[in-house]
Image (cartoon, rainbow, N blue to C red):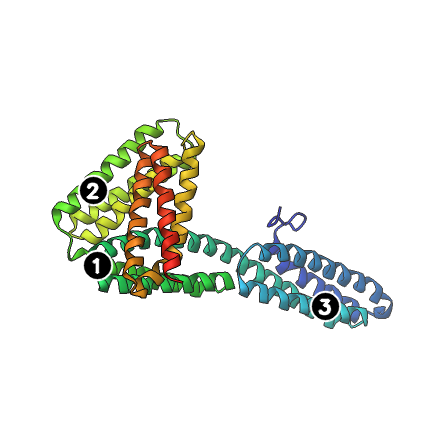
Amino acid sequence: MRGQTRGFGKPALRAAVLPVVLAAAFLAVLASPGAVQAQTGSGEQLRAYIERTDELLDWASGLVADTNSEQARMVLEQAQTIQRRATALMERGRLLESFAVARRARDATWHAVRLAREAASLEERIRLRAERFADQHSQLLDRARDAGDQRALELLQRAGEQARRSQERFQQGDLELAWNLLEHAEELLRRAARVLAQGVWPERLRLEIERTHSLVEDAGERLGANAPAAAAALLAEAEDALARAEEASAQGDPGRALQMAGLARRLAQRAIAQVEPNADGAGVTRLLERFDERAGAVAEAVLSSGNEPAQQAFARARAQRDGAAQALVEGHAEIALRQVRAAHDLLDQVERMLR
């Protein structure tokens, strides 16, 4: 398995101690009266050190390849270049120079390993944060369209652009910038939520939270005590989002409350989808996911097109999609299937109108 260093013992300790031991050995040999004869022995020690560094480089290459860190890749390439110099110096009999260069290669290799391990952790955090952003962005976009709030739509469009830039940087291996761009996108999302919250009435908020309560409770009853781990985890996240919605409502932040209530409903629906026993339910879930991908790809073009028929068809497609999701949760797979197919048909019309 990649990431295991069989035969390396404690890498950090060995990397620190072995160069000192070898250096002392080389100096002792070269300072002795029989230095010429001892060159063979010191050369064998150096060759062993370089061979172990080659093994370390091979292992590190697999670790770096499993991450998306451009910085780790560059440092590893530098280590490989330095190691080739060390090998060439050794073959020309320049042992002390070779040893000094080999130490640099080993140090650079461990630096690349540290960067790769840090990147692996950051990659996962970025993926989870991007998924959370996509959920919240989709919900707020629906609300902004329903309200016809141009200011909120503008903020959401800018948030989507920042998220796309973050994804591009992520794919290029610039993880720190990807993280920062995603933070900016989330701030724009919060601003859009505050703009939309200005028109939210207390009664509407109360009904939204009550509806969410019912859906989460229904999901818990349908899953039961022996639910699969994945479904139980999704339900726990739904309950947590609902608690945050109630907390935000109590603190007078209706925008945040609606946002968290919507997230709780979607998580509860996903939890139920995990235990759907029939193929129809699973098929509808896949069609819903595919619709969300397609709709997300054309949403910006629809909003900026000024094409009113396309915008109306897009709104109807979204309504059909939401109806399908609700029907699926209520156990009406056939109705859900018809509605999600209608949603895709409407989306086809939208794409033709935009050509």
Give whichever of 258, 87 is nearer the camera.
258
Is residue 129 in view from this perspective? no
**Mark 2 Cα shell of 10 Å, populated few (<14), some (14-19), many (≥20):** many
Numbered tag placed on residue 269 in the rendering: none
| Distance Cα–Cα, label 1 vs label 2 | 23 Å
Give the x, y percent position of residue 52. Answer: 71, 57
Numbered tag placed on residue 148 in the rendering: 1
Is residue 45 in view from this perspective? yes
| Distance Cα–Cα, label 2 vs label 3 | 65 Å
Q: Which residue, given by chain and number where applicable, does mark 3 sit on?
A: 84
Give whichever of 24, 19 is nearer the camera.
19
**Mark 3 Cα shell of 10 Å, populated few (<14), some (14-19), many (≥20):** some
Q: In which quarter of the image is residue 103?
A: bottom right
Numbered tag placed on residue 209 in the rendering: 2
Q: Which residue lies most toward the top here?
A: 225
Give the x, y percent position of residue 204. Answer: 15, 46
- The answer to whether mark 3 and mark 1 are in CB contact below 8 A is no
| Distance Cα–Cα, label 3 vs label 1 | 64 Å
Q: Marks 2 and 3: which is nearer the front?
A: 2
Q: In which quarter of the image is residue 241?
A: top left
Residue type (three-letter) at the residue carrying disc 2: Ile
Q: In which quarter of the image is residue 195?
A: bottom left
Q: What element carries label 1?
A: loop
Q: Which sits earlier in the primary sequence, circle 2 or circle 3?
A: 3
**Mark 1 Cα shell of 10 Å, populated few (<14), some (14-19), many (≥20):** few
Residue type (three-letter) at the residue carrying disc 3: Arg
Residue at x 67% of width, y 65% of height? 80
Give whichever of 331, 183 is nearer the camera.
331
Residue type (three-letter) at the residue carrying disc 1: Gly
